[in-house]
Amino acid sequence: MTDKGLGWLAGSLKKLLPPTGPFARLFLGTPKKREGATVPATIVVGTQWGDEGKGKFTDLIAKEMTMVVRYQGGHNAGHTLVVDGESFALQLVPSGVLYDHITPVIGNGVVVDPLVLIAEMDKLEAKGVDCSRLQVSGNAHVIFPYHQQLDRLMERHLGKNKLGTTKRGIGPAYADKASRVGLRVQDLLDEKIFRAKLDVVLHEKNPLFAKLYNKLGYEVDDLVDTYLGETLHRIKPHIADTIDTVHTALEGGQGILFEGAQATFLDLDHGTYPYVTSSNPTAGGACTGAGVGPRHINRVIGIAKAYITRVGAGPFPTELFDEVGDHLVDVGHEYGTNTGRRRRTGWFDAVMARHAVRLNSLSEYAVTKLDVLDDLGTIKMCVAYEIDGVRTEKLPYHQTDYHKAVPVYEEFPGWKTDLTAMTERSQLPSEAINYLAAMEEQCGVPINMVGVGPGRKQFLHFTATV
């Protein structure tokens, strides 16, 4: 065939073949890597009912990143970090703020109480933490006092059917967002827009307070004075186009960590509804809550306690009501970071863990608080449920079945050894290794990191992964 004929054939194949794949590479050659091509990012997600210790591992992983992005939730969930013996309780500010090289970002999927955010920054700066790098999405929605008031009143109105919310106004703020009457952070920058939107929402809210709850409403001028004065002055330097911030970092080859609040089984769509939060803490929520597509994500780390806890109402198949449950509360300090509420405790639930792997496309697990089990002679793990006498290893989709689920346990001998100073897998007693290995087998993904104490350095690598 002549050179002209070969050129015609190559041109025809180029039009017919997909731009990538083995056949394209065979006939067309390997495409050149585009300069500024994006690099993958990592998501850290809770896989139980929250309080798994996400902040600790987010902080550890963030060390290798340049940006940490919080993608959903509000100040109803807290992260506690212990650095050199000093405790840092974070509510809205992403965990990476403790590193000088990290840009902490509050994404568009978060609901923000500006007064709480300012108070949190003040506390951090009083401890020597620089918050000047913090960016807040202009598209994030604002929590106002009427949201918090409505949250309290609705919980009281529900009585014995209350959801167990933190009464921080999170749900009502997300409800306004979905109803398209919410105010966003960027609205604080334009008083005319701010007033107009407040007029609309208070025209709805004030009659509700008066007629249904016999409570006073709110005045536009009062809210303008509160939020467009010193409050705006404090947060204005932090308001940014975080979509551009995130994508500029990705295109520049920088590592990004996406951090969620709450956890998989508090997800609005996939959790134990209605005992859930009002957003999507699952890995998919990182894409919408931070403004990125899934092709950027190559690592999804699920965080799980070596046992399990829950705050508030809702089903809990492995819940403990005995001295072991009390032991887990006492040794694990199982009280809410923000609310101080006592957490419900139970044995590790592998049925939930397997479902979390599916929902989040987990690449690996990180296990926290293994040391809390140090003094127990026998440790149990739920590997299946029995519902109406029938065994199932899958999470039931129907709430009635889930409420009837009876855990099927496997028992493991305890290790009766203090793990808190251990830094290598080889130092673990065989009983602890067997328990973790069983968790890996049940969940179907490797366990990479294991926490053996609250401190930043109290962890070890269990199975090497990505």
Image (spheres, rainbow, N blue to C red):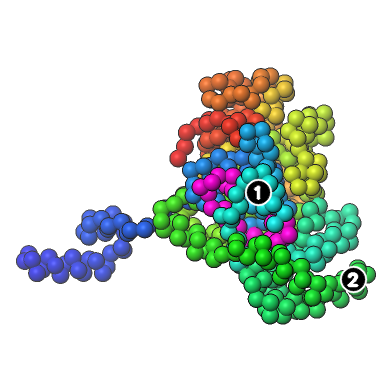
The range drawn in magenta is 96-117
Lateral position of residue 186 relative to residue 3, left or right: right
Q: Nearer the viewer, mark 1 or mark 2?
A: 1
**Residue found at the far left of this picture:** 2
Compared to residue 42, the image places residue 377 above or below, namely: above
10 Å crowding of disc 1: few (<14), some (14-19), many (20+): few
**Residue found at the far right of this picture:** 214
Q: Position of residue 377 (x, y in %)?
A: 72, 21
Q: Position of residue 432 (x, y in %)?
A: 61, 24
Quarter in which the C terminus is drawn: top left
Question: Which secondary structure lies at badge 2?
Answer: loop
Q: In the rendered image, which quarter is residue 333 located in?
A: top right
Q: Which residue is mark 1?
A: 125
> Residue 189 or 81: which is nearer the viewer?
189
| Residue at 76 percent of width and 44 percent of height | 336
| Residue at 9 percent of width and 69 percent of height | 4
Compared to residue 386, the image places residue 33 above or below, namely: below
Q: In the rendered image, which quarter is residue 373 located in?
A: top right
